[in-house]
Image: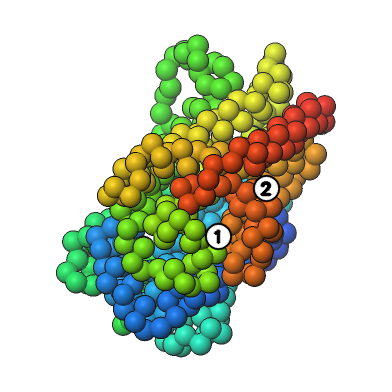
Amino acid sequence: MNTTAGARRHAARHPSTAADTLAGLGICVRFILRRNWMRLSIWAAVLALMIPLVYDSQQQIFPNQADRDAYARVANTPVVAAMTGLPYAAGSLGGILVIKVWMTLAVALGFASIFLVTRNGRADEETGRTELLRSLAVGHHAYSMANYLVVGSLSVVAGLLISGLCLGLKLPPNGSWAMGASIAGTGLVFVAISAICGQLATTSRGANSLSVGLLGVFYLIRAGADLQGEGTTASALSWFSPIGWAQNMRAFGDNNWWPLLAMLGWAVLGCALAVRIENRRDLGSGILPERRGPGSASRFLATPLGLVLRLQSLSLIGWLLGAILLGGFFGSVARAMVFALDPDNAYTQSLIGTERGTLNGVLGALALFNGLLAGAFAVQSQAGARGEEESGRLENLLAGSLARPVWLGAHVLVAAGGSAAMLLLGGYLTGAASQGAASGGQMAAASLAYWPAVLLMIGVLLFCQGVLPRAATTIAWAFYGISLGAAMFGGLFSLSQDAIKATPFGMVPRMPAEDFAAMPLVLLSVIALVLGTVGLWRFRTRDLIPG
């Protein structure tokens, strides 16, 4: 009898046919779509809409071929090659579009693939949802395959939307299709990478950290290959990075299609390897052994703030490094941007103004970029509090003497303090690298002026965490996106200066192009304080709501 029962358990764990292992695949696909349809829609829409926004702005900034040729000469610098890739077609509108937005879209889609695959894979296994599903008539690999198919479909849909919008803008058809395909291929590669990392790591945090770390390594390999390139041709090192593979499709240039086959092969083989590993490990375990921590925690780690810093340490370090690198990059191209921009252009005037010269306007815009970057970190960091509640870990923490406001306040301190450090570091390096255009102290102060706007982002999320917890993160990111769009592209939407100045980032004076004004900063701080206080009070009194 025991032997029969054991055989049944073995058969259930190791089904004999592929059809059995994928039983219920359609149901799992619908279930994942039901849970993630809003996230998938937002990612696809935001990525695709960047194309017409950036294209419209560059048409206004570079209205004729002479302007584009001048930009091509400015763009062919080591800094631009390291950040966005080699400018192989910088004299055309399509080539400028690639320089402006390709790397951002490809890396962003890579992040989306990583986070979504982990959310529906290792995170669900960690919380017990996968075990519950497998107890029903669902095959051993059905849920994982559904996860890979759904998230992979995001890359395909985003690529098709990008290509369609490029075609709608009258860009060359071959380049338009290569543009969308190269970005989609990058997303598919990172679906496979995150699928494998989800099998190697034991926790969702570990899977995300490992995947994001690999993305960073591949980005740096690609940057090194472009820096070592000859002319507009990258070195052979680029073939050691999937980002380099995608970039070597050279949309609106050579339009090479064969690198797409390599990316598709990576995606298929990577997902197959992940399924193979899943078949050989126990549910809830990972291939990589968990590292043993110290026998006892330090006094600081035992505090709420110490715990939050420990949990967000890798993310915080990554954001700070990003602020440092971008600050140096912004400063190094500040003077070059002056020669590339037409001060009489309407969009240029909207973005940088003309009252105190183009150089001061460029520096003011760079300070705004630093503020927007810090705002993104603040939302992401504060959203971690909602993630702890969704996972159910918060309930265990509050079972002792820890008070809710103290726990949530620790997340606020990390988000606020980390964003302030980003603004100071990024601003200082922007000034220090600007070749005398401004001092490090001046740009640090200009960037730090955006801190009240960043605090408002935190305040909105705190308010939503207290009042609308299930939609809190989505609302906060939407509010941030609208604020970013108004500050950066308000002129393209024909928004008046009064309307732009009514938004959080638009309200902040763009020093040194504008005079310092304390009243907008005080107003933003007061609104942030009121929203945060209401959110903290409501969070203290409401029931916990897991995901």
The residue at 71%/27% (across/down) is 395
How many residues crowd mark 1 within 10 Å: few (<14), some (14–19), many (20+)?
Answer: many
Instruction: Find residue 179 and report its image quarter.
Output: bottom left
Front position in the image: 408 or 75: 75
Whether residue 130 is visible, yes or no, is: no
Q: Amino acid at mark 2?
A: Ala
Asked if 447 appears above or below 264 in the picture, the reply is above
Asked if 448 appears above or below 176 in the picture, the reply is above
> Which dot marks residue 476?
2
Secondary structure state at the residue bearing disc 2: helix
Q: Earlier in the sequence, mark 2 or mark 1?
A: 2
Instruction: Quickly name the residue at label 1.
Output: 488
Location of residue 192 in the rendering, given as x and y in whole percent from the top left corner: 45, 59
Front position in the image: 204 or 482: 482
The residue at 53%/83% (across/down) is 169
Marks 2 and 1 sit apart, C-alpha to C-alpha, by 18 Å
